Amino acid sequence: MLEISRIREHKAEITEALKTRNLNVEDQLSSILAIDEKWRQAKSELDAVAQESNKIAKEIGQLFAQGKQEEANAAKAKTQELKESEKSLKESVSTLASELQTALYEIPNVPNKLVPSGNTDEDNQEIDKGGTIPELGDGAKPHWELANDYGLIDFELGVKVTGAGFPFYLGQGARLQRALINFFLDEARDAGYKEVIPPFVVNEASGYGTGQLPDKEGQMYHAQEDDFYLIPTAEVPLTNMFRDVIVKEDDFPIQVTGYTPCFRREAGSYGKDVRGLNRLHQFDKVEIVRLEHPSKSAQALDEMVSYVQGIIEKIGLPFRTLRLCGGDLGFTAAMTYDFEVYSAAQDKWLEVSSVSNFETFQSNRLKLRFKDENKKSQLVHTLNGSALALPRIMAALLENNQTENGIKIPEVLVPYTGFNMITK
């Protein structure tokens, strides 16, 4: 959520920057400032009434002590009028504050100056590329066929027990899944991230804190009776650990990682892009979250991008790194890099990670601050990234490493799987 002070001081700059997202928010910002002006005026009147009421209340006792009964009673009547006025003003201040917050929730984050203009994912900038795309030859199979042939994943059983998008991992498929999770967690630990096992459901405040609500409400599974949400990503509980917290400046960078299942309704998804593991309603992911001093967050983002690239290289998958254009940028992000791996049998790129800098957008919602060297309170910069989301990594590993004799396991994963080949 953008700070109201920032909108007051830089309305024109924000309006221009959000055009990178193909949005014209000038009228919305004007409306927000109008609400803010009404709120400040009502708040000023409320403070003045409260101050006058307190002043008169002190005078009443003095008037009684001086025997000025009539004047004291008149003062008491005046305080009653002021209390009625104070009550009305409190309601106005509360209503206007709610209106202001609702209006601010509708404005996305301001893109970083490095974010390119563009409308769709076709306008994203490729900034890096690595690895070798394997030549599989005739007879190569997509991962859903390999999963069936080798008894690794049962999609139909998932449909029976739950529904489409909730697969069962079996045998060596389950062991490979667990190996990937443990490998990604160990890599994060070695890079200085503290491992956390968070809850897999969160309350509404947490959803608002990181920006999933109200923007992505339709994509989240909601347990209505308890008003809990199944997490769409570990970003939500990991970042909300620090909601309403003032962290110490000396503690930067604060780095946490966690493995969780993730739950996404993926409403509107259909067609060939949802085959097999390409798009699921439940999937596993290891997330990294970082809190940074504002002066260091750009460097932190670069470090996180390098980190994700490094673990993709270690498991031997061809990849490319994309800087997202304004039209493809997520609502809460100031800048995002996507990682895609190449799925050889499908002959397509699959997104496996997004690494984002939210700057102060989340911390303003979270009321997450630190005190600088002058003891002045400032908003923290928050960052997060998938490191990594497993389904499409699994898909690419199965497809790219298939041979006549089985599916090869990347050498770095063998200590985790306990086998170097998947066989029938």
Image (cartoon, rainbow, N blue to C red):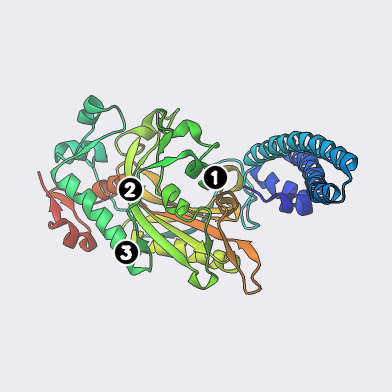
Q: Residue at x 28, y 33 (%)?
A: 166
Residue at the disc numbered 1: 330
> How far apart are the two marked residues, 3 and 1, measured between alpha carbons?
27 Å
- At mark 2, the secondary structure is strand
Q: In the image, is 264 to the left or to the right of 52?
A: left
Residue 299 pos. (x, y %)? 54, 68
Q: Number of numbered discs present?
A: 3
Specify which label sits upstream in the sequence, 2 or 3.
Answer: 3
Disc 2 marks which amino acid? Thr
Position of residue 334 relative to residue 141, above or below, is below
Residue at the disc numbered 2: 260
Callout 3 crowding tier (Cα within 10 Å): few <14, some 14–19, many ≥20 = some
Of residue 61 and residue 300, the one placed in the foreground of this image is 61
Quarter of the rendering containing residue 70: top right
Q: Do the residues labelled 3 and 1 touch (CB within 8 Å)?
A: no
> How far apart are the two marked residues, 2 and 1, measured between alpha carbons?
21 Å
Specify which label sits upstream in the sequence, 3 or 1.
Answer: 3
> How far apart are the two marked residues, 2 and 3, measured between alpha carbons?
16 Å
Residue at the disc numbered 3: 187
Disc 1 marks which amino acid? Gly
Q: In the image, is 306 to the left or to the right of 369?
A: left
Looking at the rendered image, the disc whose residue lies closer to the viewer, 2 or 1, is: 2
Specify which label sits upstream in the sequence, 2 or 1.
Answer: 2
